[in-house]
Amino acid sequence: MPWVTLDPPPLCLPSLSPLNRILPPTIHDVGARRLSGERFISGGYPPGRSCVLGLSHVWSVLLAAAWVALRFTAFTVLQGGGILGFRLCGPEGQGFSLDASSLPLVLYVFSAVIYLSCSAAAHLLESHSELRHRSLFLLDYVAGTVYQYGCALALSLYSADAAWAQGMLGQAFLPAAALLAWLSCTACCYAELRPRRPYPLGRRLCLLAAVAAASLLDISPVAQRLATHSWTSSSALHFLQVVLFLLSAFFFSFHVSVRFYAGRLALQLSHVLLSLCTLAQQEALFRDFLWRRAALVRELGEERLLLACASLPGLAMCCATTALAMRRRAQAQQI
């Protein structure tokens, strides 16, 4: 039975011989297709001996993770007055400093870097065994959920207007976002245990509904602002973020890039679009943060802000516990 391949350059394989002894061989073609459910890839995933070559498949995600971290570092130095005393402030704002009002932004950036890094690791290293495949994607789902809630936290505090925040939806937003995020994570983790791929239509619709409900709720602060207020530079970035996210969801759901470029996952448009979406969202949040920061503590209070920030690691623990339980079930299925 042939090993799964993705057109690895044969001339590069001898140079990777030390890696061959470290990484185990990949699963066979049938196993890869059963796990991934990709009907348009006849060869499956890169073998362990050319795992480094698989970096080409996740380059956009890795570059986005590096840019998010570097851009945030530059932002904190510039807005903190570390270079030439430069400081950009809103009408009530101040530059960056680590306190209760800036903690949601720090958590958002941390969740974005973790999510992008885990996504790259999952797509790069998952093909060595069935258990590793499931374990890495369970980790990817947890990281994605944490990032999803980190977005909801930052958008509700920095990007929402006062009318939305004081309304019924604004008051119940974070608890509802946390619940829907956990439900979407649970649905993704449970689907990962199912051996039958591609999923039946009913299961796919349930999975899509769980993720879509959480995503639509998370962008509701931005949607309300775009619909009811005159646009600023941050509003344009938020609009770009929404467009890129919808395009990424379309290409991912219908496997457009895989369908027409099978065997060349470096052209996965969904990864590129999602990475650009994250970068646009980060820039928009930087502008909103500078505009809202000083008034945030006065309007909400420091204790409420810290409690809202504490909900993110709490959700991460719940999702990690769920993923660990699913992994134990996956191990039991292999016995």
Image (tube, rainbow, N blue to C red):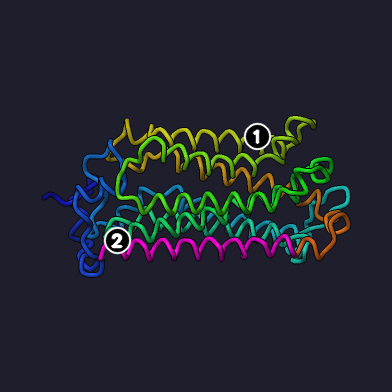
On residue 194, which mark appears?
A: none
Of residues 224 and 65, the one nearer the viewer is 224
Mark 2, Cα crowd under 10 Å, few <14 / some 14-19 / many 20+, is few
Question: Is residue 91 at all visible to an observer of this figure?
Answer: yes
Task: Provide the secondary structure element on which disc 1 rests.
Answer: helix
- The amino acid marked with disc number 2 is Gln
Residue, x 45% and y 37% (percent of image)?
A: 205
Does residue 22 belong to the magenta stretch? Answer: no
Quadrant hosting residue 72: bottom right
Residue highlighted by disc 1: 239
Above or below for 327 versus 269: below
Q: Is residue 87 left or right of residue 130?
A: right
- Of residue 191 and residue 163, the one placed in the foreground of this image is 191
Q: Which residue is mark 2?
A: 333
Query: Which quadrant of the figure has residue 37?
Result: top left
**What's the magenta bit mostly, secondary-structure-wise?**
helix
Q: Position of residue 144 (x, y in %)?
A: 52, 53
- For the residue marked with disc 1, what is the amino acid? Phe
Q: Nearer the viewer, mark 1 or mark 2?
A: 2
Report if residue 327 lies within the magenta region: yes
Classed neighbour count for the residue bearing mark 1: other residues with Cα under 10 Å, few (<14), some (14–19), many (≥20):
some
Quadrant position of the C terminus in the picture: bottom left
Q: Secondary structure at mark 2?
A: helix
Q: Is residue 1 left or right of residue 47?
A: left
Residue 9 seen in this snapshot: no
- The residues bearing labels 1 and 2 have C-alpha atoms spaced at a distance of 44 Å
Foreground: 209 or 256?
Answer: 209
Residue range corresponding to the magenta coloring: 307-335
Residue drawn at point x = 50 percent, y = 64 percent: 320
Whichever of labels 1 and 2 marks the residue nearer the N terminus, that label is 1
Numbered circles on residues, count: 2
